[in-house]
Amino acid sequence: MTLHWKLVVDANDPHAQADFWAAALGYELEDNSALIKRVIDMGAAPPAAAVDSHGRRAWRDLIAVRHPDDPYDEDTGMGLGRRILFQRVPEVKTVKNRLHIDLHADPGAREAEVARLEALGAVVAHLVKEPGGEWVVMTDPEGNEFCVQ
């Protein structure tokens, strides 16, 4: 048996984080606007639970990105494959991640990829050189570590 899963990332600004990671990975922002309209119209959530984002309604405190080639539920907009959900939390990140994403650049393209990610708002933390390889440790706009191989 296999399970459907998503990676959930705590964030102070889930929409900014989703924008960064969608651009970094080439993913798409999920469009949950039809679901949000139904939920609010039923009275199951207040209108203040949603915001306008990229010209459509989105949950204020949750937003996901999904791989553009993966299926999604047309009724809810939720991805059915590779996806990352960003959820608002009140506290800021204070310690090193226990889980992180590794990005794999094409051979010889790591420096260009690092520069592209810096232009999106990432910061280089340090370069790692070990007998098993080299990679760049970076942080996203909220300080979450990730690596570029």
Image: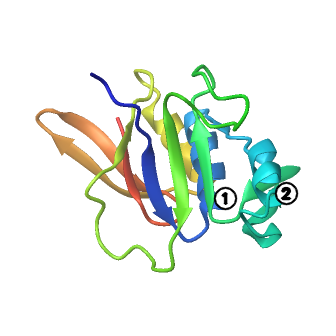
Q: Position of residue 80 (x, y in %)?
A: 54, 29
Q: x and y percent of residue 64 in the render?
A: 60, 47
Looking at the image, which residue is at 77% across and 70% down?
46
- Residue indicated by mark 1: 15
Answer above or below: position of 142 versus 82. below
Q: Position of residue 8 (x, y in %)?
A: 44, 52
> In the picture shown, does residue 64 fall above or below 132?
below
The residue positioned 78% from the left and 64% from the top of the image is 43
The mark total stands at 2
Would residue 45 be found to the left or right of residue 63 on screen?
right
Quadrant in which residue 23 is drawn: top right
On screen, 108 above or below 20? Answer: above
For mark 1, give the secondary structure: helix
| Location of mark 2 (residue) | 41
Query: Which residue is nearer to you in this view: 12 or 26?
Result: 12
- Closest to the observer, 49 or 15: 49
